[in-house]
Amino acid sequence: MFVVNREAIQRTFTMTDCIAAVEEGLVAWTRGAAFLHPRFQLPGGPSNALMGLMPVVAIEPERLWGLKAVMVAHGNPQQGLDSHQGAILICNAETGVPLALVDATEITAMRTAAASALATRALAKPDVGRIAILGTGRQARTHVEALRVGYPKAEFRLWGRSPKAEALAQSIGACHAVSVQEAIDGADVICTVTGSREPLLKGGWITPGCHINAVGASRPDARELDSDLVARSEFFVDSRSQAETECGEYLIPLGEGRIGTDHIRAELGAILAGQAPGRSSPAAVTVFKSLGIAVEDLWAAARALECAKAAGQAQQVRW
C-alpha cells in the first residue's frame, strides 16, 4: 500500500492536475461510471470535532472504492491548523485490498476550489475581470489559486472578519476590502468561503450577470446567501440529493415558499458532460452551491497518487 502525505501532494500535485481530475470524476459520475453514497455527518459532542464519512465507488476506468474520513474542527485555525483533517482510503473495488492512504486535508482544500473553478468556467460570463473572495481561511487561498488558472489577469478582492484579512490579501495579490459590499462591487464572480451561519450576501446587492460560488455552509440550518438572492438566481449544485438534505441555501427558502422543488436547474457534472445547459442569458445571476462530494475526493486522490508515484514521493508500506 502507498501513503501520500501532505508534503508529497504539495510537491507533486498541481492545481491544474486537480481541476482536470475533478472534472473527469464529475463527468464519470454523471455518465454512470461511479456511484456516490450518502455522506454521514457524525457529531462528537460539545467542543469535539465532527466526523464526516464519504464513500464512493468507481467503475471506470478502474474499479475502486474510496472512503474519505474527515474531521471538521472549527477551532483549529486558532491553533494554526486547517479545520479539515483526515485521510482518503483507496481500495480495489473487487478484492477490497487497500491500495493507498492519501492526506485528505490537502485534497479537500484543492478539490473544493477546483470544483468552483469548473463551475465558474461553465456558468460565469466569459469576460471575467473582477473576482471577490469572502473569507480568510484555507479556501480563500486555494480559490484564488484555482481561479487564476482560468483567469490569470483577473483582479481579486478579499474581505473577511479576521484581523489577518489585510495581510492575507497582500500575500495572495488581492485588494483588501473593508466590507462585503466593497468587495463585491463590480465583481463578475463572487466566492463565499466563510464559516458564517447567517447570510452574507443579499439579493439586492448582486448585479446582473454575476456568478456566485457558495462554498462555506454545508448544514440545513446554515447559509451564506439570503432567500432573495437564491430566489432570483439560476441555481446549480454538485449533488442534487445532497442539496436536498444538507443545503441551507436551498432548504430555507424552500421552507419559506420562496422557491419550489424545481429550483435546482442541474448538477455541475451534467453541464460539464454536455447534458444540461448553463446560464440562460448574459444578465442571469447564477449560483453554484458546492457541498463537496466524494467523487471529487476519489478522483483527485487517485490523480495525486499517480503524480506522487511518478515523482518517487509516494511511500510504500507493508499492509
Image (cartoon, rainbow, N blue to C red):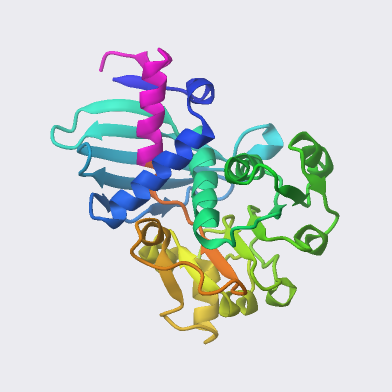
Residue drawn at the location 30% of the way across and 33% of the way down: 90
Viewer-closest of 304 and 160: 304
* Residue sitting at the far left: 94
Q: Residue furthest right?
A: 178
Whether residue 49 can be seen here: no
Q: Residue at x 59, y 55 (%)?
A: 216
- Magenta stretch containing residue 318, yes or no? yes
Q: Quadrant of the C terminus?
A: top left
Towards the viewer: 306 or 256: 306
Residue 256, placed above or below residue 198: below
Residue 259 higher or lower than 193, as above or below: below
Question: Is residue 134 shown above or below 48?
Answer: below
Q: Residue furthest bottom?
A: 257
Q: Residue 303: within the magenta?
A: yes
Residue range highlighted in magenta: 298-319
- Residue 233 in the image: state x and y as whole percent: 57, 75
The residue shown at (50%, 80%) is 254
Taking depth in this image into account, of 55 and 166 the one nearest to the observer is 166
